[in-house]
Image (cartoon, coloured by chain):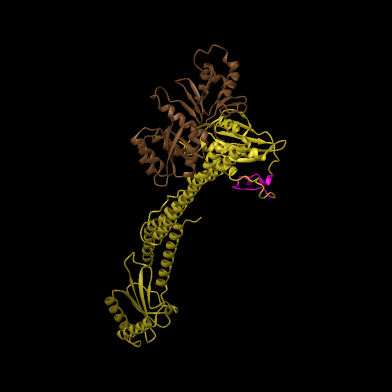
Chain colours: A brown, B yellow
């Protein structure tokens, strides 16, 4: 069954392209060129809304606030890159996610799937950790890349979780060991590099050129904050 | 710099001093006017008629003198041509001197006033009267000086008030110069200073509007650029064909997007003049992330600084990008702690290096090394932004020669930049 997506975007060309891109993967895209039209058509019942932050008739944040006041349909905002203030404002007024323009359509698809998946079961447990196209669900102990599940062993999952809980920090092997909780009996220390390379194989696009789990010579590992930028 | 208030005040006091001096001088040596001389001659003729003629006995003259002295309540004496006293009553009076004529007939002395009248018959009539204590010339000068001091003291607050308004105005002008575009001066009164404040406010208003308009048009321009970029990006993913070609397209779009980003970032930093959001950033981790993106080997120790994570990422990215573009082969990034207050990031390459004269100039926006125009080897905004960001974090960016050939770009960052809570 096709998912229904409402795209409120004044750039008709971009909207058509996105519709074309999403059609083969099961999305039926309705395009609204103005906030006014978008807000009117929202009542038709959509599974997800894509909302541009710069609209000719209404500020995107205001549009988001109005959508949120009427329903809890997932909203993904398209913002200008680098506007962190925008991002914060967008999330505070109830957007579920944001994506800076120009975006990689694959990433857009991953995020759409992520917000849809999160909506389906009633929110239970902690919100999953998300890093661009990667999603780590602590409660379900699952990892998704581009919305597709990647398999990891329990040890590997614990190690990934320890890293992903401190993104943007260099963690030495000692610190990593201390953070990996649970019944880790085997000598983790020596095999830590092996485990990392297994995790990389599962979640990196190119395990030889990792972008998510990085090695710092003589210091340890870093889980990258920004992983998908070209 | 001599303060304006002091200058005005000194002028007031100087003028006052000069006025006092001139008044005193004029009073002391006021010349005898023809009108006054006429008056003296008539008085002398009248007095001459009251006195007995010179050929009368001396006793008669003495009697007349005593009568006049009683009437005038003054010391009176009559001298002959040679200055010998002929008759006198009361205290002794000095004989007339030949230059008395030039000093006037009425003379104020310290303790007395004397009238000297040369009579038509050649004799000289002198009358003198002591005056009450404290009413002499000295007393007059003292009171004049006191008046001057009073005016000097009174004009002080007036002058200060005038110039203080100017000083306040200057403060607001400086605020504007520092980048506080909302700076406005209060308009006090309706004089030229108030006019100046009004003019300043109008100018500041205009500047603020212009800067905002420029910032807005930049934002709109970047949005306009991003729309076609966003379409291009989606189109690229939908294309089938040579993956290498697609990868090249991705890189070009990213580069274009990066330029838009940098222009925006630079203008934002300039108009804001400081840091926005700050948090604790692990510089080593950030360097590792950026090195993973563009290629490079990272080593060093974790150093945490307070700063704007997006700006610091931009700084590291630009440094690495610069090294990748201008250096040959492997790029190294070293992060270290310098004392308790500084973090040092060095990006090292083995490229051709930068000529000594160029080492500071590469931090200028869109600087191109001489002799290579239009070869795409300029630095764009990249390094200018690096320096701007380093300075916004209380630090500095430098370019050094690397031992054994190549370039070191060195950035010092304050662990806790000034002006951050």
Q: Main secondary structure of the magenta part?
A: loop
Q: Residue furthest right?
A: B404
Which one is nearer the viewer's eye here, B132 or B248?
B248
Magenta segment, which residues? B355-370
Side (left or right) of A133 relative to A190:
left
Name the quarter where the C terminus of chain A is drawn: top right
The magenta stretch spans residue B62: no
Compared across the picture, whether B285 is left or right of B105 comes to right
Q: Which residue is outermost to the top?
A: A185
Viewer-side residue, B146 vs A66: A66
Image coordinates for residue A27, horizontal then vertical, percent = 45, 33
Q: Is residue A39 above or below residue B287?
A: below
Q: Is residue A47 above or below residue B6?
A: above
Give the answer, above or below, for where A228 lies relative to B37.
above
The foreground one among A100 and A162 is A100
Q: Quadrant of the N terminus of chain A?
A: top left
> Does the magenta portion include B364?
yes
Q: Is residue B332 left or right of residue B185?
A: right
Q: Nearer the viewer, residue B374 or A28?
A: A28
Asked whether the viewer can see residue B271, the reply is yes
List x then y, in percent, for residue A119.
40, 28
Residue B338, percent from left and from top: 59, 32
| Residue B171 left/right relative to B130 | right
Total labels: the figure holds 0
Q: Is residue B416 visible?
A: no
Q: Position of residue B368 (x, y in %)?
A: 65, 48
């Amino acid at each position: 069954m096709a998912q229904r997506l409402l795209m409120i975007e004044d750039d008709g060309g971009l909207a058509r392209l996105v519709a074309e891109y999403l059609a083969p993967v099961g999305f039926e895209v309705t395009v609204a060129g103005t906030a006014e039209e978008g807000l009117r058509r929202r009542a038709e019942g959509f599974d997800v809304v894509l909302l541009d932050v710069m609209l000719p008739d209404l500020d995107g944040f205001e549009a988001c606030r109005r959508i949120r006041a009427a329903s809890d349909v997932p909203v993904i905002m398209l913002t200008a890159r680098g506007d962190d203030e925008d991002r914060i404002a967008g999330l505070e007024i109830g957007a579920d996610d944001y994506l800076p323009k120009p975006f990689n359509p694959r990433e857009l698809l991953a995020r759409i799937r992520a917000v849809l998946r999160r909506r389906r079961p009633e929110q239970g447990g902690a919100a999953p950790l998300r890093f661009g196209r990667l999603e780590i669900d602590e409660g379900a102990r699952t990892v998704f890349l581009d919305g597709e599940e990647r398999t990891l062993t329990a040890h590997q999952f614990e190690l990934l979780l320890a890293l992903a809980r401190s993104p943007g920090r260099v963690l030495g092997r000692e610190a990593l060991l201390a953070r990996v909780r649970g019944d880790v009996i085997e000598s983790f220390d020596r095999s830590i590099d092996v485990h990392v390379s297994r995790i990389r194989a599962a979640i990196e696009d190119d395990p030889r050129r990792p972008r998510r789990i990085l090695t710092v010579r003589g210091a340890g590992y870093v889980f990258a904050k920004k992983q998908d930028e070209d | 710099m001599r303060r304006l208030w002091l200058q005005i005040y000194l002028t007031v006091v100087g003028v006052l001093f000069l006025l006092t001096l001139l008044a005193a001088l004029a009073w002391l040596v006021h010349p005898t006017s023809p009108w006054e001389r006429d008056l003296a001659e008539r008085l002398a003729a009248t007095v001459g008629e009251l006195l007995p003629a010179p050929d009368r006995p001396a006793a008669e003259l003495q009697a007349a003198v005593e009568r006049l002295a009683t009437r005038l309540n003054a010391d009176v004496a009559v001298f002959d041509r040679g200055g010998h006293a002929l008759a006198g009553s009361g205290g002794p009076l000095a004989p007339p001197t030949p230059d008395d004529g030039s000093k006037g007939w009425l003379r104020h002395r310290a303790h007395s006033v004397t009238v000297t009248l040369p009579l038509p018959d050649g004799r000289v009539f002198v009358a003198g009267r002591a005056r009450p204590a404290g009413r002499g010339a000295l007393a007059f000068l003292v009171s004049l000086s006191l008046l001057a001091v009073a005016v000097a003291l009174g004009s002080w607050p007036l002058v200060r008030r005038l110039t203080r308004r100017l000083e306040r105005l200057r403060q607001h002008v400086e605020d504007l110069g520092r980048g506080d575009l909302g700076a406005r001066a209060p308009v006090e009164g309706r004089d030229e200073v108030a006019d100046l404040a009004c003019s300043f406010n109008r100018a500041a208003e205009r500047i603020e509007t212009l800067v905002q308009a420029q910032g807005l048009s930049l934002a709109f321009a970047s949005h306009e650029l991003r729309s076609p970029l966003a379409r291009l990006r989606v189109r690229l993913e939908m294309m089938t064909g040579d993956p290498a070609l697609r990868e090249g397209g991705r890189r070009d779009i990213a580069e274009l997007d990066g330029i838009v980003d940098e222009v925006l970032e630079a203008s934002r930093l300039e108009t804001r003049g400081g840091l926005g959001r700050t948090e604790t950033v692990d510089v080593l981790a950030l360097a590792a992330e950026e090195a993973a993106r563009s290629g490079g080997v990272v080593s060093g120790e974790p150093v945490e600084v307070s700063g704007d994570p997006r700006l610091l990422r931009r700084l590291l990215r630009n440094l690495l990008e610069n090294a990748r573009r201008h250096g040959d082969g492997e790029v190294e990034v070293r992060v270290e702690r310098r004392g308790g207050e500084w973090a040092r990031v060095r990006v090292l390459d083995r490229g051709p290096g930068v000529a000594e004269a160029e080492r500071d100039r590469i931090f200028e926006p869109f600087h191109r090394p001489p002799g290579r125009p239009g070869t795409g080897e300029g630095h764009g905004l990249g390094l200018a932004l690096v320096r701007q960001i380093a300075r916004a974090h209380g630090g500095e960016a430098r370019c050094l020669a690397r031992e054994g050939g190549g370039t070191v770009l060195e950035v010092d960052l304050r662990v806790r930049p000034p002006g951050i809570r």
